[in-house]
Image (spheres, rainbow, N blue to C red):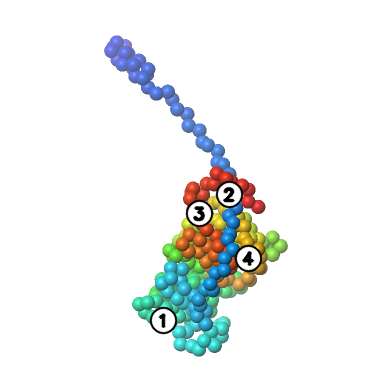
Amino acid sequence: MRPLPLASLLALALGAACSPPPRFWSRREPTATPALRPLTAEAVIAAPVATDPDGAFASADGRSRSRQGPCQRDAREADRVPADEPMKACTFTPGRGWHEWTFPEPGVLLDVFDRVALVARTNRDGDVDVMRYDINLGRATRLMLPEPTARWARAGFTRSGMLAGLVRTGTADRPGSSWVRGATDGTLTMSALPFDADDLGTTDDLTVCVGPGGAALVSAVGWSRRIDLPATSTATQRPRADVARAGERVVCAMGQCVIDGVARVVLDPSGGGVDPAAADIH
């Protein structure tokens, strides 16, 4: 082997002297999600929500109204819906007025957004499924939960058409709840709640859940904050046994949520979910 010329040796030595020192990267251990200080709800007297005599409700974006049952019926017949026949419903939109549509099985109408409906249906095993039903195409799809043993409690649409719901995950002796979110034509995600809840309202970014154990503000990034309710709140009422539309007890709009018409929570999403005044939530 021929020895390197003197000029090459000098170049190698100079490069080694000027090169940066080696870096050794280490992985930071994950830290626990910070528990945030509680919020305080303000006592208010809210005006009752306007509803039709036969139970019509507005969509979350306010662009339509829907009710279960045929369009042409007497208001006194609103509660007499056949339990063993395909479900009929009636939806009002400014462009079409009231128009009737049919879900091909017995069911309970939960919510409507644009041309998509959520319907609760009892399956052959006696469990309740939540179905996504495309009204124009007449196509029904069962919404799959990540946890097979979870049982639906609430389901509804947000203002942007995403699904927000509650499921029961515990037993009668040790009840538990998780909140569900996602696109109705995609994968749903579940997050356990720090208490047993029976309803929720959402602004897409933040969600307020309420139940016999109180109320809490939860975020999709994993943190939660307890809400201290005024004494006039009815949050201690027991959860209902059937599946119902989300947002009956909690109504959220314009950066605030009203619980049971008597407690208002102002949402503050600043800080990206990190609160420097963290305090444990129990």
Between the C-alphas of marks 3 and 4, the distance is: 21 Å
Mark 2 vs 1, N-terminal side: 2
Amino acid type of the residue that numbered disc 1 sits on in the rendered structure: Trp
**Which mark is nearer the camera, 4 or 2?**
4
The answer to whether mark 2 and mark 3 are in CB contact below 8 A is no
Q: Which residue is mark 2?
A: 36
Residue 30 at x, y percent in the picture: 55, 41
Measuring 43% from the left and 25% from the top, which residue is drawn there?
Answer: 22
Q: Amino acid at mark 4?
A: Ser
Camera-nearest label, 1 or 3: 3
Instruction: Tell whether label 2 touches label 4 (CB within 8 Å).
Output: no
Q: Is residue 40 above or below residue 30?
A: below
Mark toward the viewer: 2 or 1? 2
In space, the residues marked 1 and 3 are separated at their CA atoms by 38 Å
Task: Determine the CA span between mark 1 and mark 4.
Answer: 36 Å
Label located before the other in sequence (3 or 4): 4
Circle 4 residue = 233
Question: Which mark sits nearer the N-terminus, 2 or 3?
Answer: 2
Inter-mark Cα distance, 2 to 3 = 12 Å
Using a 10 Å C-alpha cutoff, classify the residue at mark 2 as few (fewer than 14 neighbours), some (14 to 19) or many (20 or more).
some
From the image, state whether disc 1 or disc 4 is nearer to you: 4
Q: Which residue is mark 1?
A: 98
**Mark 3, residue position:** 268
Which of marks 3 and 1 precedes in the sequence? 1
